[in-house]
Image: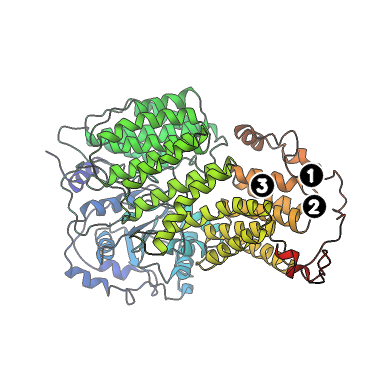
Amino acid sequence: MKTDIAAFHETTNTAMNESPLGMSPRPRSCTWLEQSPVSLLTLDKHPAGRLSDFCALPFSGRREDLWRLFDFMKFPTEIQWWAITGPSGPDRSRLAYELMDRMSPESYGFFLNCDADISSLDDFHPSQDLLVVIDPVTGHEAAAAGFIATLMDKFEESIYFLRILLLEQCSPLPGDSWYDRLEQSFDAEHRSLFRSTEYDPSLCTLRGHNFLRLDQPDRIPESSTGGQPEMNRGGTVGQPGTDGGGTDGQPGTEDGGTDGQPGTEDGGTDGRDLNDAVTHLSLLADITSPEMVPELLPPTWQVDLVNAELDFWKSFPTESEQAHLLKLRGLYYCSRKLVCWYPDASSWEALELLCDFPESDGIISYKIAFLLDHAAYFTDSLHDGKRSAQLVRQVRPLLDRLPQGDTQVKLRLRWYREHSMNLILQERWSAALKLKDEIFPLVDWEDEVQVEYYAYWAFSCTMGAAYAQEAEKTLDFGALLIELTEDYAHAMRTIAFSDRTHYYYLHTRCIVLKFVSISASITGQNSFGVSRVEDLIEEISSNMMNGDLAGLLVGAWALKTEFDEMLSKKEMNSYLEETDEYLEQYPDHPFLAQYAIGLWVAAYEAFFQKNAPAEKVTRAYAMLQRFPHHREIIDNFFRLLGHSNERDNWDYYVSDEKLRQLLALYKRDYLLTPAAVSVAATDEPFVRMEKKVYPNDPCPCGSGKKYKKCCGRK
């Protein structure tokens, strides 16, 4: 007989050492309302009314979610924040109230009134552990960022814990989301701290948010492991993610405990063993994520620690379904880091243990997701099609064992993406394109997440073809997503078109238009390509700007700079100035960095036709150091270096050992010869051999018309 998650926690918590954040329930009261340190922390303007009224709302069906919040409170770091999302009416606020009502007497909490004066915190000094709830964030992003930054500063210097809980209806998606606005309201230092203190209950190594999502009001779990996990939304640009457990693009849990947290069965693994396992997973969470520096070696102690964790998971007993899942997650986490850091014997051993792990009905979807994650890393970062193909082949029969439903469709769409990328690495273009006939019938076009997975597949294939310089194939794959968007725009059929799908579409158009502009220029129809680029610039500019869209806008400016012979000096300088502003505003977006360097290359090669100044090269080199695992940034940097006054210092720029490792990894020959546009080896400014024709000059053909009204139009 299985117990529910709340009963399990009550059992295992008694076996734990008493923690400074013990969550012992206490009688219902609102005494914590009077413990607010300053008057600004009031409930008068809370949208749901005064929280004392919540006493009239019975708390039911959220035991699993409440215990997940208890785990958040007990996480062993001083400062942490998390978010509760989902269209669940008053449930978010009610759940936060229940958490406060059950907090230990040594802690206090309150809902933040963002309309208050932040100077009220000047004399505040932490004397207890604190929980702050912000409900909602939308409309108060700047004020919320100010309060959060101030509280973080005060608690960094104290011995107490700070927990911040954000309540919002929508999960953050690329575009003008509440998360984007909140993040950009911080200064650079606090933005970095805010990102590093996000709580991740799944210990995921991929990009994305794993917030607590309340999909169904009053959900009471029937069992601690029942059914297949449910995949929800979340994540950031790159690939569709989850929001409620699981890693980016991987399943979370619906009925069974928290993702990666134990449930139990009668006669199963001892509660102490499970609790010990959770502690080990928490330890791994504090180790540098391989996604941050995938090719650069971490400190030796981190590698030794992960190897020690691997030994722990190899011997961990699996007498229950929950212990089985914990061991699978532990092996995945170790193998993911070791393969990324040191692809040697120990890392392959960890991956083999993951591949050979027995698949029970309760965890098969997790194993599929973990193997596909590895396959994506081999394909996208290491370009190792052989190992990726092996994992893809292993996953195929496992998909057939999954019951029909939403989870199977989403995992199958992920599988098609990895399979397609393997075919593209093998240059089997026709086979990859034909997969559209298998993928298209799978998608429920009224399901936002499934549409995102389809869009991500088409976008990834377009990127792969573009990187291989296959113009025809780039247009073919790009057309799949462009046609989908046109069907949505003209209401040809019902399509759940999300912000993330829109981003994939805009990025795909930017890629496709580069090849269209090249073709139009070659055939003497330059104005056709330029007009399409101008349409893209207008469409991107009409959106509320964020870092991802800013990157696409700068990329479109680079295309216009390269192909528009009518571009004025005023426009060019405007592009450069606005790009500098975006780089200051969004310093952590690699696509923006990539396209910014591309714009500088186009500006000095095609427009100014002179060597780029040293300051641009220095700034581009700093971006290369910041985002070392982006091949396009490396390529654009060396193009800029080859067309700059810093070209004679080539040896200096390639002397960095970490950069040399990357060049070897990506098979780049920049160590030997400049692979950029050939220019004379001199520090003298570029000298034009013929007079430049400006738009208002007489046309050289002798027609008597202005150049812009004659040959300039061609």
Could you say which disc has been placed on residue 538 in the image? Answer: none
Tell which tag, 2 or 1, sits nearer the viewer: 2
Mark 3 or mark 1: name the one nearer the start of the chain. Answer: 3
Name the residue at 74% across, 55% down: 606
Q: In the image, residue 553 lies at what x, y percent?
A: 58, 60
Q: Amino acid at mark 3?
A: Asn
Q: CA distance from mark 3 to mark 1?
A: 14 Å
Q: Amino acid at mark 1?
A: Arg
Q: Which residue is mark 3?
A: 636
Q: Which residue is mark 1?
A: 647
Badge 2: how crowded within 10 Å, few (<14), some, or many (20+)?
Answer: many
Badge 3: how crowded within 10 Å, few (<14), some, or many (20+)?
Answer: many
Q: CA distance from mark 3 to mark 2?
A: 15 Å
- Check if mark 3's residue and mark 1's residue have beta carbons within 8 Å: no
Is any part of residue 81 visible from this angle? Answer: yes
Q: Amino acid at mark 2?
A: Asn
Q: Which residue is mark 2?
A: 611
